[in-house]
Protein backbone atom coordinates (compact mmCIF):
# COMPACT_ATOMS: atom_id res chain seq x y z
CA UNK A 1 0.00 0.00 0.00
CA UNK A 2 0.88 3.66 -0.35
CA UNK A 3 1.76 4.22 3.29
CA UNK A 4 -0.21 4.34 6.49
CA UNK A 5 -2.28 7.44 7.10
CA UNK A 6 -3.55 8.93 10.34
CA UNK A 7 -7.33 8.98 9.97
CA UNK A 8 -9.99 10.37 12.31
CA UNK A 9 -13.37 8.69 11.84
CA UNK A 10 -16.21 10.72 13.36
CA UNK A 11 -19.38 8.75 14.16
CA UNK A 12 -19.53 5.08 15.15
CA UNK A 13 -22.71 3.97 13.38
CA UNK A 14 -22.63 1.36 10.62
CA UNK A 15 -20.43 3.44 8.30
CA UNK A 16 -18.02 4.52 11.04
CA UNK A 17 -17.52 1.06 12.54
CA UNK A 18 -17.08 -0.50 9.08
CA UNK A 19 -14.65 2.20 7.95
CA UNK A 20 -12.63 1.88 11.16
CA UNK A 21 -12.32 -1.90 10.70
CA UNK A 22 -11.48 -1.76 6.98
CA UNK A 23 -8.94 1.05 7.39
CA UNK A 24 -7.29 -0.46 10.48
CA UNK A 25 -6.96 -3.80 8.67
CA UNK A 26 -5.09 -1.99 5.88
CA UNK A 27 -2.58 -0.59 8.37
CA UNK A 28 -3.86 2.97 8.84
CA UNK A 29 -3.79 4.57 12.30
CA UNK A 30 -7.44 5.07 13.26
CA UNK A 31 -9.06 7.25 15.88
CA UNK A 32 -12.82 6.66 16.11
CA UNK A 33 -14.98 9.14 18.03
CA UNK A 34 -18.71 8.96 18.76
CA UNK A 35 -21.05 11.63 20.09
CA UNK A 36 -23.17 9.29 22.23
CA UNK A 37 -22.03 8.89 25.84
CA UNK A 38 -22.87 5.20 25.65
CA UNK A 39 -24.01 2.87 22.88
CA UNK A 40 -27.75 3.28 22.34
CA UNK A 41 -29.74 2.35 19.25
CA UNK A 42 -33.17 3.87 18.77
CA UNK A 43 -34.26 1.17 16.40
CA UNK A 44 -35.81 -2.24 16.51
CA UNK A 45 -34.36 -4.22 13.68
CA UNK A 46 -32.64 -3.89 10.36
CA UNK A 47 -32.70 -5.89 7.14
CA UNK A 48 -29.37 -6.94 5.72
CA UNK A 49 -29.68 -7.92 2.07
CA UNK A 50 -27.08 -10.01 0.26
CA UNK A 51 -24.93 -7.01 -0.74
CA UNK A 52 -24.72 -5.92 2.92
CA UNK A 53 -23.85 -9.48 3.92
CA UNK A 54 -21.04 -9.67 1.32
CA UNK A 55 -19.56 -6.52 2.86
CA UNK A 56 -19.93 -7.91 6.37
CA UNK A 57 -18.10 -11.05 5.23
CA UNK A 58 -15.25 -8.85 3.97
CA UNK A 59 -15.16 -7.19 7.39
CA UNK A 60 -14.77 -10.65 8.95
CA UNK A 61 -18.10 -10.80 10.78
CA UNK A 62 -20.55 -12.70 8.56
CA UNK A 63 -20.51 -15.85 10.66
CA UNK A 64 -21.37 -13.95 13.84
CA UNK A 65 -24.12 -12.00 12.06
CA UNK A 66 -25.71 -15.21 10.78
CA UNK A 67 -25.50 -16.72 14.27
CA UNK A 68 -27.42 -13.89 15.97
CA UNK A 69 -29.66 -12.72 13.13
CA UNK A 70 -32.47 -14.51 11.33
CA UNK A 71 -31.94 -15.89 7.83
CA UNK A 72 -35.19 -15.70 5.86
CA UNK A 73 -35.60 -19.05 4.07
CA UNK A 74 -34.93 -18.73 0.33
CA UNK A 75 -35.05 -14.92 0.65
CA UNK A 76 -38.83 -15.19 0.59
CA UNK A 77 -41.02 -12.06 0.66
CA UNK A 78 -44.75 -12.76 0.76
CA UNK A 79 -46.97 -9.91 -0.41
CA UNK A 80 -50.53 -9.94 0.94
CA UNK A 81 -53.36 -7.46 0.70
CA UNK A 82 -54.58 -5.67 3.80
CA UNK A 83 -57.06 -8.49 4.51
CA UNK A 84 -54.17 -10.98 4.48
CA UNK A 85 -55.01 -12.50 1.08
CA UNK A 86 -51.95 -13.50 -0.99
CA UNK A 87 -50.88 -11.25 -3.87
CA UNK A 88 -47.49 -12.66 -4.89
CA UNK A 89 -44.36 -14.21 -3.37
CA UNK A 90 -40.96 -12.93 -4.48
CA UNK A 91 -37.42 -14.06 -3.67
CA UNK A 92 -34.46 -11.78 -3.04
CA UNK A 93 -31.24 -12.93 -4.70
CA UNK A 94 -28.49 -14.53 -2.59
CA UNK A 95 -24.84 -13.74 -3.41
CA UNK A 96 -21.66 -15.65 -4.11
CA UNK A 97 -23.46 -18.53 -5.79
CA UNK A 98 -25.84 -18.98 -2.87
CA UNK A 99 -23.15 -19.10 -0.15
CA UNK A 100 -24.26 -15.69 1.18
CA UNK A 101 -27.97 -15.59 2.05
CA UNK A 102 -30.45 -13.24 0.38
CA UNK A 103 -31.74 -11.50 3.49
CA UNK A 104 -31.12 -11.51 7.23
CA UNK A 105 -33.07 -9.65 9.90
CA UNK A 106 -31.14 -8.58 12.99
CA UNK A 107 -31.55 -6.33 16.01
CA UNK A 108 -29.61 -3.16 15.31
CA UNK A 109 -27.94 -3.37 18.71
CA UNK A 110 -26.70 -6.88 17.83
CA UNK A 111 -25.21 -5.65 14.55
CA UNK A 112 -23.31 -2.98 16.49
CA UNK A 113 -22.22 -5.46 19.14
CA UNK A 114 -20.72 -7.65 16.42
CA UNK A 115 -19.00 -4.70 14.71
CA UNK A 116 -17.71 -3.45 18.08
CA UNK A 117 -16.24 -6.88 18.84
CA UNK A 118 -14.49 -6.91 15.44
CA UNK A 119 -13.13 -3.41 16.11
CA UNK A 120 -11.55 -4.59 19.34
CA UNK A 121 -9.96 -7.50 17.41
CA UNK A 122 -8.33 -5.11 14.93
CA UNK A 123 -7.26 -2.70 17.68
CA UNK A 124 -9.82 0.11 17.26
CA UNK A 125 -11.32 1.64 20.38
CA UNK A 126 -14.33 3.94 20.28
CA UNK A 127 -14.04 7.16 22.23
CA UNK A 128 -17.61 7.72 23.36
CA UNK A 129 -19.01 11.14 24.24
CA UNK A 130 -16.49 12.84 21.94
CA UNK A 131 -17.06 15.24 19.04
CA UNK A 132 -15.03 17.58 16.88
CA UNK A 133 -15.16 21.17 18.17
CA UNK A 134 -12.72 22.77 15.75
CA UNK A 135 -11.08 21.76 12.50
CA UNK A 136 -8.46 23.47 10.34
CA UNK A 137 -8.18 21.84 6.93
CA UNK A 138 -4.65 22.45 5.68
CA UNK A 139 -2.68 21.52 2.57
CA UNK A 140 -0.46 19.04 4.40
CA UNK A 141 -2.71 17.90 7.25
CA UNK A 142 -5.94 18.55 9.11
CA UNK A 143 -5.75 19.87 12.68
CA UNK A 144 -8.64 18.79 14.89
CA UNK A 145 -9.69 19.83 18.37
CA UNK A 146 -12.08 17.40 20.06
CA UNK A 147 -14.47 17.92 22.96
CA UNK A 148 -12.05 16.15 25.33
CA UNK A 149 -9.60 19.05 24.66
CA UNK A 150 -7.27 16.86 22.60
CA UNK A 151 -5.55 18.63 19.71
CA UNK A 152 -4.31 16.27 17.00
CA UNK A 153 -3.13 16.38 13.43
CA UNK A 154 -4.42 13.85 10.90
CA UNK A 155 -4.06 13.12 7.20
CA UNK A 156 -7.81 12.67 6.75
CA UNK A 157 -11.11 13.08 8.61
CA UNK A 158 -13.98 10.80 7.55
CA UNK A 159 -17.45 11.92 8.60
CA UNK A 160 -19.72 8.98 9.33
CA UNK A 161 -22.02 11.20 11.40
CA UNK A 162 -25.25 10.29 9.64
CA UNK A 163 -28.11 12.55 8.59
CA UNK A 164 -27.21 15.56 10.70
CA UNK A 165 -23.45 15.49 10.08
CA UNK A 166 -21.91 18.79 11.24
CA UNK A 167 -18.91 18.10 8.96
CA UNK A 168 -21.24 18.24 5.93
CA UNK A 169 -21.19 22.00 6.45
CA UNK A 170 -17.42 21.96 5.86
CA UNK A 171 -17.80 19.97 2.63
CA UNK A 172 -21.07 21.45 1.33
CA UNK A 173 -22.11 24.55 3.27
CA UNK A 174 -25.87 24.99 3.42
CA UNK A 175 -26.76 21.41 2.47
CA UNK A 176 -28.99 19.92 5.16
CA UNK A 177 -31.18 16.83 5.40
CA UNK A 178 -34.61 17.37 3.88
CA UNK A 179 -37.88 15.76 4.89
CA UNK A 180 -39.07 12.99 2.55
CA UNK A 181 -42.78 13.25 3.39
CA UNK A 182 -42.87 9.70 4.82
CA UNK A 183 -43.21 8.40 8.35
CA UNK A 184 -42.39 4.90 9.59
CA UNK A 185 -43.95 3.16 12.58
CA UNK A 186 -41.99 0.28 14.07
CA UNK A 187 -42.68 -2.20 16.88
CA UNK A 188 -41.03 -5.33 18.30
CA UNK A 189 -42.88 -8.54 19.22
CA UNK A 190 -42.35 -12.17 20.15
CA UNK A 191 -41.99 -14.22 16.95
CA UNK A 192 -44.41 -17.10 16.44
CA UNK A 193 -42.24 -20.11 15.52
CA UNK A 194 -43.92 -20.56 12.13
CA UNK A 195 -43.43 -16.93 11.03
CA UNK A 196 -40.18 -17.18 9.10
CA UNK A 197 -40.78 -15.18 5.90
CA UNK A 198 -40.60 -11.46 5.33
CA UNK A 199 -44.22 -10.36 4.89
CA UNK A 200 -45.44 -7.17 3.22
CA UNK A 201 -49.12 -6.26 3.37
CA UNK A 202 -50.41 -3.64 0.96
CA UNK A 203 -53.05 -1.24 2.18
CA UNK A 204 -54.58 1.97 0.89
CA UNK A 205 -51.71 4.45 0.80
CA UNK A 206 -49.79 2.47 3.42
CA UNK A 207 -47.71 -0.72 3.71
CA UNK A 208 -47.30 -3.03 6.71
CA UNK A 209 -44.19 -5.20 6.97
CA UNK A 210 -43.27 -8.08 9.28
CA UNK A 211 -39.66 -9.24 9.59
CA UNK A 212 -38.11 -11.89 11.87
CA UNK A 213 -34.96 -10.53 13.60
CA UNK A 214 -33.92 -13.41 15.87
CA UNK A 215 -34.95 -16.87 17.02
CA UNK A 216 -37.60 -15.30 19.28
CA UNK A 217 -38.28 -11.74 18.06
CA UNK A 218 -39.66 -9.99 14.98
CA UNK A 219 -40.33 -6.42 14.14
CA UNK A 220 -43.15 -4.80 12.26
CA UNK A 221 -43.13 -1.55 10.34
CA UNK A 222 -45.89 0.56 8.90
CA UNK A 223 -45.08 3.14 6.24
CA UNK A 224 -47.33 6.18 5.96
CA UNK A 225 -47.40 9.36 3.95
CA UNK A 226 -47.21 12.43 6.22
CA UNK A 227 -46.44 15.53 4.13
CA UNK A 228 -46.97 17.83 7.13
CA UNK A 229 -44.33 16.08 9.30
CA UNK A 230 -46.77 15.76 12.18
CA UNK A 231 -45.20 15.77 15.63
CA UNK A 232 -46.47 12.92 17.81
CA UNK A 233 -46.23 12.75 21.60
CA UNK A 234 -44.07 9.71 22.43
CA UNK A 235 -46.52 8.36 24.99
CA UNK A 236 -49.15 8.21 22.22
CA UNK A 237 -47.03 6.24 19.73
CA UNK A 238 -48.55 2.77 20.41
CA UNK A 239 -52.10 4.10 20.04
CA UNK A 240 -51.24 6.18 16.98
CA UNK A 241 -49.52 3.22 15.29
CA UNK A 242 -52.65 1.12 15.85
CA UNK A 243 -54.85 3.88 14.44
CA UNK A 244 -52.66 4.66 11.42
CA UNK A 245 -52.74 1.01 10.37
CA UNK A 246 -56.27 0.20 11.52
CA UNK A 247 -57.40 -1.22 8.15
CA UNK A 248 -55.04 -4.23 8.38
CA UNK A 249 -56.29 -7.77 9.07
CA UNK A 250 -54.38 -10.99 8.35
CA UNK A 251 -50.97 -11.48 10.03
CA UNK A 252 -50.67 -7.75 10.88
CA UNK A 253 -53.76 -7.80 13.09
CA UNK A 254 -52.38 -9.83 16.01
CA UNK A 255 -49.34 -7.55 16.29
CA UNK A 256 -51.38 -4.34 16.05
CA UNK A 257 -53.76 -5.66 18.72
CA UNK A 258 -50.81 -6.31 21.03
CA UNK A 259 -49.78 -2.64 21.05
CA UNK A 260 -50.32 -0.86 24.34
CA UNK A 261 -48.50 1.77 26.39
CA UNK A 262 -45.85 -0.79 27.42
CA UNK A 263 -44.97 -1.66 23.81
CA UNK A 264 -41.63 -0.99 22.17
CA UNK A 265 -42.87 1.43 19.45
CA UNK A 266 -40.87 3.93 17.44
CA UNK A 267 -41.98 6.64 15.01
CA UNK A 268 -39.50 8.12 12.53
CA UNK A 269 -40.19 11.04 10.22
CA UNK A 270 -37.82 10.10 7.39
CA UNK A 271 -35.23 12.59 6.12
CA UNK A 272 -32.99 12.36 3.06
CA UNK A 273 -29.63 13.88 2.13
CA UNK A 274 -29.43 14.83 -1.54
CA UNK A 275 -25.87 15.93 -2.08
CA UNK A 276 -24.24 16.24 -5.50
CA UNK A 277 -20.52 15.56 -5.79
CA UNK A 278 -18.04 16.31 -4.41
CA UNK A 279 -18.53 14.44 -1.15
CA UNK A 280 -15.18 15.70 0.11
CA UNK A 281 -13.37 18.97 0.49
CA UNK A 282 -9.67 19.11 1.23
CA UNK A 283 -8.97 16.45 3.81
CA UNK A 284 -12.57 15.90 4.99
CA UNK A 285 -14.73 13.21 3.36
CA UNK A 286 -18.35 12.15 3.90
CA UNK A 287 -19.59 8.56 3.65
CA UNK A 288 -22.82 6.71 4.54
CA UNK A 289 -25.90 8.70 5.52
CA UNK A 290 -23.78 11.84 5.98
CA UNK A 291 -23.40 11.89 2.17
CA UNK A 292 -26.51 10.16 0.85
CA UNK A 293 -29.16 9.21 3.43
CA UNK A 294 -32.22 7.85 1.64
CA UNK A 295 -35.69 6.61 2.45
CA UNK A 296 -35.72 3.07 3.89
CA UNK A 297 -38.11 1.38 1.42
CA UNK A 298 -35.39 -0.76 -0.20
CA UNK A 299 -33.61 -1.45 3.12
CA UNK A 300 -30.33 -0.39 1.50
CA UNK A 301 -28.97 2.48 3.65
CA UNK A 302 -26.91 0.20 5.88
CA UNK A 303 -25.67 -1.79 2.87
CA UNK A 304 -24.59 1.42 1.12
CA UNK A 305 -22.75 2.56 4.27
CA UNK A 306 -20.89 -0.76 4.49
CA UNK A 307 -19.95 -0.70 0.80
CA UNK A 308 -18.79 2.93 1.10
CA UNK A 309 -16.45 1.96 3.93
CA UNK A 310 -14.84 -0.88 1.98
CA UNK A 311 -14.50 1.06 -1.27
CA UNK A 312 -13.01 4.04 0.59
CA UNK A 313 -10.45 1.78 2.23
CA UNK A 314 -9.51 0.34 -1.18
CA UNK A 315 -9.28 3.77 -2.81
CA UNK A 316 -7.01 5.05 -0.02
CA UNK A 317 -4.33 2.64 -1.21
CA UNK A 318 -3.52 5.48 -3.63
CA UNK A 319 -0.78 7.78 -2.32
CA UNK A 320 -2.54 10.81 -3.80
CA UNK A 321 -5.35 11.69 -1.37
CA UNK A 322 -7.28 13.91 -3.77
CA UNK A 323 -7.19 11.19 -6.46
CA UNK A 324 -8.27 8.56 -3.92
CA UNK A 325 -11.27 10.56 -2.70
CA UNK A 326 -12.29 11.50 -6.23
CA UNK A 327 -12.16 7.86 -7.33
CA UNK A 328 -14.22 6.85 -4.28
CA UNK A 329 -16.94 9.30 -5.30
CA UNK A 330 -16.90 8.25 -8.96
CA UNK A 331 -17.46 4.65 -7.89
CA UNK A 332 -20.04 5.24 -5.18
CA UNK A 333 -22.17 8.16 -6.43
CA UNK A 334 -24.07 6.28 -9.19
CA UNK A 335 -24.76 3.31 -6.91
CA UNK A 336 -25.94 5.32 -3.90
CA UNK A 337 -28.08 7.71 -5.95
CA UNK A 338 -29.69 4.79 -7.79
CA UNK A 339 -30.58 3.12 -4.46
CA UNK A 340 -31.94 6.45 -3.15
CA UNK A 341 -34.05 7.02 -6.28
CA UNK A 342 -35.55 3.52 -6.43
CA UNK A 343 -36.35 3.63 -2.73
CA UNK A 344 -38.14 6.98 -3.06
CA UNK A 345 -40.15 5.67 -6.04
CA UNK A 346 -41.19 2.58 -4.05
CA UNK A 347 -42.34 4.82 -1.20
CA UNK A 348 -44.27 7.06 -3.56
CA UNK A 349 -45.99 4.15 -5.25
CA UNK A 350 -47.03 2.76 -1.82
CA UNK A 351 -48.45 6.15 -0.88
CA UNK A 352 -50.48 6.29 -4.13
CA UNK A 353 -51.80 2.74 -3.72
CA UNK A 354 -55.62 2.56 -3.95
CA UNK A 355 -55.91 -1.12 -3.03
CA UNK A 356 -57.74 -2.01 -6.25
CA UNK A 357 -57.66 -5.47 -7.81
CA UNK A 358 -56.21 -4.07 -11.04
CA UNK A 359 -53.36 -2.48 -9.12
CA UNK A 360 -52.62 -5.72 -7.24
CA UNK A 361 -52.61 -7.77 -10.44
CA UNK A 362 -50.20 -5.34 -12.07
CA UNK A 363 -48.01 -5.43 -8.95
CA UNK A 364 -47.99 -9.24 -8.87
CA UNK A 365 -46.99 -9.43 -12.55
CA UNK A 366 -44.06 -7.02 -12.13
CA UNK A 367 -42.81 -7.76 -8.58
CA UNK A 368 -40.10 -10.40 -9.12
CA UNK A 369 -38.80 -8.64 -12.22
CA UNK A 370 -38.46 -5.41 -10.26
CA UNK A 371 -36.43 -7.11 -7.50
CA UNK A 372 -34.16 -8.85 -10.01
CA UNK A 373 -33.64 -5.67 -12.01
CA UNK A 374 -32.79 -3.66 -8.89
CA UNK A 375 -30.01 -6.04 -7.83
CA UNK A 376 -28.78 -6.50 -11.42
CA UNK A 377 -28.55 -2.74 -11.86
CA UNK A 378 -26.68 -2.34 -8.55
CA UNK A 379 -24.19 -4.92 -9.86
CA UNK A 380 -23.87 -3.13 -13.20
CA UNK A 381 -23.31 0.23 -11.53
CA UNK A 382 -20.71 -1.18 -9.18
CA UNK A 383 -18.98 -2.90 -12.09
CA UNK A 384 -15.74 -4.54 -11.17
CA UNK A 385 -15.21 -2.21 -8.22
CA UNK A 386 -17.82 -3.78 -5.94
CA UNK A 387 -16.74 -5.23 -2.63
CA UNK A 388 -16.33 -8.98 -2.93
CA UNK A 389 -15.45 -8.91 -6.62
C1 LIG B 1 -36.99 3.83 9.62
C2 LIG B 1 -35.69 3.39 9.00
C3 LIG B 1 -35.49 2.04 8.71
C4 LIG B 1 -34.31 1.62 8.11
N1 LIG B 1 -34.15 0.30 7.82
C5 LIG B 1 -33.02 -0.12 7.20
C6 LIG B 1 -32.84 -1.49 6.87
O1 LIG B 1 -33.69 -2.33 7.14
N2 LIG B 1 -31.68 -1.85 6.25
C7 LIG B 1 -30.70 -0.94 5.93
O2 LIG B 1 -29.66 -1.32 5.38
N3 LIG B 1 -30.85 0.36 6.24
C8 LIG B 1 -31.97 0.79 6.86
N4 LIG B 1 -32.13 2.11 7.18
C9 LIG B 1 -31.04 3.04 6.84
C10 LIG B 1 -29.89 2.92 7.82
O3 LIG B 1 -30.38 3.05 9.14
C11 LIG B 1 -28.85 4.00 7.58
O4 LIG B 1 -28.61 4.15 6.20
C12 LIG B 1 -27.55 3.66 8.29
O5 LIG B 1 -27.76 3.59 9.67
C13 LIG B 1 -26.50 4.68 7.96
O6 LIG B 1 -25.37 4.45 8.75
P1 LIG B 1 -24.39 5.64 9.10
O7 LIG B 1 -23.33 5.03 9.93
O8 LIG B 1 -24.02 6.38 7.88
O9 LIG B 1 -25.25 6.66 9.97
P2 LIG B 1 -25.90 6.46 11.41
O10 LIG B 1 -26.37 5.08 11.58
O11 LIG B 1 -26.86 7.56 11.58
O12 LIG B 1 -24.69 6.67 12.42
C14 LIG B 1 -24.15 7.95 12.67
C15 LIG B 1 -23.37 7.89 13.97
O13 LIG B 1 -22.65 9.11 14.14
C16 LIG B 1 -22.89 9.62 15.45
N5 LIG B 1 -22.76 11.08 15.37
C17 LIG B 1 -23.66 11.97 14.91
N6 LIG B 1 -23.17 13.22 14.96
C18 LIG B 1 -21.92 13.09 15.49
C19 LIG B 1 -20.89 14.05 15.79
N7 LIG B 1 -21.06 15.34 15.58
N8 LIG B 1 -19.73 13.58 16.30
C20 LIG B 1 -19.55 12.25 16.52
N9 LIG B 1 -20.50 11.32 16.27
C21 LIG B 1 -21.65 11.74 15.74
C22 LIG B 1 -24.29 9.14 15.79
O14 LIG B 1 -24.51 9.13 17.18
C23 LIG B 1 -24.28 7.73 15.18
O15 LIG B 1 -23.74 6.78 16.05
C24 LIG B 1 -33.29 2.55 7.79
C25 LIG B 1 -33.48 3.90 8.09
C26 LIG B 1 -34.67 4.32 8.68
C27 LIG B 1 -34.86 5.80 8.98
Image (cartoon, rainbow, N blue to C red):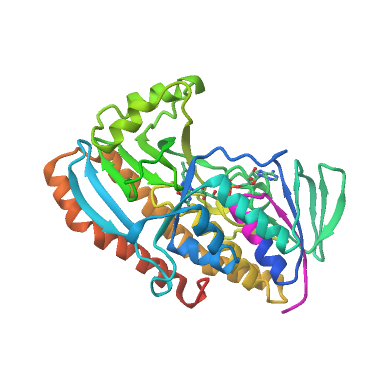
From the image, which quarter does the N terminus lie in? bottom right
Residue 282 in view (yes/no) = no
Residue for point 77% across, 68% down? 5
List x then y, in percent, for residue 163: 57, 44
> In the current view of this chain or complex, which residue is farthest to the left?
358
**Which of these two is toward me, 184 or 214?**
214
In the rendered image, residue 306, in percent from the top left (x then y), is placed at: 55, 60
* Residue 121 can be seen in this image: yes
Magenta stretch containing residue 13, yes or no? yes
Q: Give the percent coordinates (x, y) of residue 312.
A: 62, 67
Q: Compared with residue 225, is residue 327 higher up or lower down, i.e. above or below?
A: below
Residue 342 in magenta? no
Which quadrant holds residue 59?
bottom right
Residue at position x 68%, y 75% in the image: 317
Tell me which segment is drawn in magenta: 1-19
Residue 44 at x, y percent in the picture:
49, 40
Nearer to me, 95 or 13: 95
Q: Residue at x 87, y 43 (%)?
A: 149
Amino acid sequence: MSGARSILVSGAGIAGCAAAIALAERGHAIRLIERQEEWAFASSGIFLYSNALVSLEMLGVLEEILAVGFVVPEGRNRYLDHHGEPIVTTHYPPAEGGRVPAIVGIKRAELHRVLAHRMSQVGVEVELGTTIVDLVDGAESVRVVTSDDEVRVHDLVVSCEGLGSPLRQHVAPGVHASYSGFGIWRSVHARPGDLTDKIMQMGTGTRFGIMPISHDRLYTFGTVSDPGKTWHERADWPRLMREALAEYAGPARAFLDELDETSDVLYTAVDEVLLPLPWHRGRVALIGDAAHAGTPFMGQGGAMALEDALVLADCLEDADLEAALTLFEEIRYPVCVYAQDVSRRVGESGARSDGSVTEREAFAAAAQGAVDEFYAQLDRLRGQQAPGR
